[in-house]
Image (spheres, helix red, strand yellow):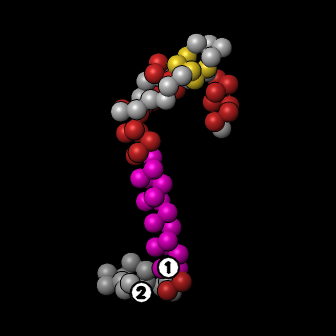
């Protein structure tokens, strides 16, 4: 595409800074798309089996969205983080 900035948003910067901003914006967009799919997919599909066999928590018992924070056991969050 090249270095084209008709509105002057990158005034005072060079072409290398513009290319870096463009690549960072693509990366952020891809992370956002993955996050959206991570939010939408559980509406239609849940893994079979147990999330925590010792506590008897199945994947199907975990609600979608922020309500999942209260259902996942503490040691499960430790493994994720």
* Camera-side residue of 10 and 34: 34
Query: Quadrant where the C terminus lies?
Result: top right
Q: Is residue 2 above or below residue 9?
A: below
- Main SS class of the magenta portion in the image: helix
The residues colored magenta run: 17-35
Q: Label 1: which residue?
A: 19
How would you rate the neighbour count of disc 2 (Cα within 10 Å): few for under 14, some for 14-19, many for 20 or more?
few
Q: Label 2: which residue?
A: 3
* Camera-side residue of 23 and 57: 57
Query: Quadrant where the N terminus lies?
Result: bottom left
Q: Decide which of tag 2 and tag 1 comes sooner along the chain.
A: 2
Q: Residue at x 48, y 54 (%)?
A: 31
Q: Residue at x 39, y 38 (%)?
A: 41
Point out the residue furthest to the front here: 48
Q: Is residue 54 left or right of residue 25?
A: right
| Residue 18 x %, y % | 48, 79
* Secondary-structure class at tag 2: loop
Marks 2 & 1, CB-CB < 8 Å contact: yes
| Residue 4 x %, y % | 37, 86
**Looking at the image, can residue 70 be seen?**
no
């Amino acid at each position: 595409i090249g270095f084209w900035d008709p509105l002057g948003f990158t005034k005072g910067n060079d072409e290398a800074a513009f290319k870096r901003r463009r690549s960072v914006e693509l990366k952020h967009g891809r992370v956002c798309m993955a996050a959206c799919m991570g939010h939408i997919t559980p509406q239609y599909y849940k893994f079979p089996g147990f999330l925590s066999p010792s506590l008897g928590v199945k994947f199907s018992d975990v609600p979608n969205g922020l309500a999942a924070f209260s259902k996942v056991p503490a040691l499960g969050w430790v493994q994720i983080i």
